[in-house]
Image: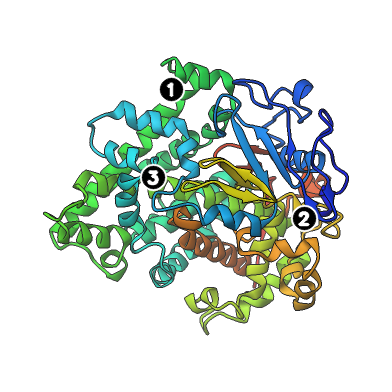
Amino acid sequence: SSAAATANKCPITGAGGDADNGQVKLCTVPKLPILGSIIPQYSGVDKFDLSKTYDWWYSNHSKFGDFISIGLPGTGKGIYGTTYIMTDPNEYMKVLRKEGQHPFGAVMTEWPFIKYYEDGGDQPGCSAGTALFSQGESWQRIRRFMQTDLLSPDAAKGYVPGMIKACQTASQGAPLHAKNINGYTAQCSFDMFSSIVFGEFPGLAGRGKKEEQDEMFCTSSIAALELIIPMMADPTERIQHKLGFKSKTYSTFEANFTIARKIASQKIENFKERKANGELQNDFEKNSYASLAIDRYLSSLGEEGALQEDEVGELIMVALVAALDTTSAMLNWCIVHLAMNPHVQEALFEEISSNVTEEGDLTADYFSSKSKSAYLNALLRENHRITPPIALNLLKENVTDEVVIHDVTLPKQSIVMLDTRSLGMNPDVVEDPDTFDPKRWFDEENVKGRKGTPAEALDHPLYKEPFSAGARKCPGSRVANYEAKTMLSQLVLDWKISLAPDGNKIQSWRDVPYFNGLTVQPTVPELSFEKRQ
């Protein structure tokens, strides 16, 4: 239990929320049918605002405590949208143990994608898209194929040399994008994932010639993804969806996602053709994710449950689109923190520059060795504590059976979330929570000091990264982690990054505006890039 739970009762009902003798109690936040707890005057929660997502979740935690039942329409269960939220990772492990063979995934709440694929009907790729956002054997079949050659430690590490090559080119373009870092990091993510998926190096973020189709893919993917949470959070959007109407926002999403799919499909077709003709030119291409996926598809032809060719293509396309958003959100926030904290940036530079080759190049060994990249890992962990790309990244169902949490029995198939941010931003638990300090995770004394205190939860594996957990953990999680590490390292190796002169009014990360689309993206202020010698 955390210090926040102490004497925090529901301000409306006076129920629960407090911890008697260390026992965390359930606080039931008032809910209305269809609207759940989103009416502040009725429920006592703050007004929901996608430009204040972090504060909204933290405010709920402060008011209602460490274990709450709240109405989140579109996410939770039943007419009230009942959702249980907790902060204790050990209690949450009980939910994970009841995931079963066919676990629930947060993507199953993302109705715009589900509608898109249902509307697509028998069109190529739509069966794979529908399965990916579902539950059961159809999901399992698709997921098993998708995560092969992507999720295992060896598979992910195998793509790092290509990422390094992509990042060397991308980093050179950084100063050209000083006023639009958000667009730049999306292009960096595209360049890195292209090296993984196709073994290709489009150099979109670099200084060279750019393909118009690649730029369009990035802009349309981001334009589609940033509408997902706004649509899910808007009651009028959900009502129109239930009544079978297409809203203006949904139509914008649909148009952009269709453009991204078409461009990606063409890329995949071109690659398949070159592979069939024996035209793949080097090991990057031959050992790419698409090449290995095509080999697996061909070797499974005729087997029961084998994927169709269009399904394989759709999975590659979805991976390409998804890769842009989470990776760019991690990069954007990390770059903000580095620009605002020169001493942190210099400490990272010291570590990176002492782990390069004689030619000054990054190595895969640096990223895979925990001891060599200890400061880099601590920096990513500190970024995740303050500004995670997804405000609450664990949303599960106890699929197989009821579950007892803090002595309260939750019915089978309840929606249960783990709030992995509020505890780490609580000044009773973490000293100076708004200060960006990787040493919290780097220093063994700090870690030992948390043992046996409410802060100990922060060192639990469920608190460490933004990729969910269990059977539905993000299949690209290891690759995305390597991407963020590689791009940040190359940037810090090449440049001293600072806020542009007029950015001095930014004193804290709280002065940086952000918006919760599919991920929480900051509006990165204008930066200066000074070449390191």
Helix, strand or loop at disc 3? helix
Q: Nearer the viewer, residue 199 or 126?
A: 126
240 over 506 or under it: above or below: above
Q: Is residue 276 visible?
A: yes
Residue picked out by circle 3: 214
**Residue denoted by label 1:** 251
Name the quadrant containing residue 513: top right
Mark positioned earlier in the residue sequence (1 or 2)? 2
Determine whether, in the image, residue 450 is placed left or right of residue 312. right
| Image point (36%, 41%), residue name | 213
Residue type at mark 2? Ser
Q: Residue at x 83, y 45 (%)?
A: 18
Secondary structure under the numbered disc 1 in the rendered image = helix
What label sits on residue 208 in the rendered view? none
Percent from the top left, x then y, of residue 230?
Answer: 57, 30
The CA distance from mark 3 to mark 2 is 48 Å
Q: Badge 3: how crowded within 10 Å, few (<14), some, or many (20+)?
A: some
Judge from the rendering whether residue 353 lies leftward or rightward of residue 163; answer left or right. Answer: right
Marks 3 and 1, Cα distance to the nearest angstrom? Answer: 22 Å
* Three-letter amino acid code at the position of disc 1: Ser
Question: Split into 4 quadrants, where in the image is the C terminus?
Answer: bottom right
| Percent coordinates x, y for residue 182 in the rendering | 58, 45
Amino acid type, mark 3:
Asp
Question: How is the structure coloured here?
Answer: rainbow
Q: Are marks 1 and 2 in contact (CB under 8 Å)?
A: no
Q: Nearer the viewer, residue 93 or 466?
A: 93
At a point 81% along the width and 72% down the height, the residue shown is 449
The mark that comes first in sequence, 3 or 2, is: 2
Q: Observer-nearest residue: 205 or 521? A: 521
Which of the numbered marks, if any, corresponds to residue 1?
2
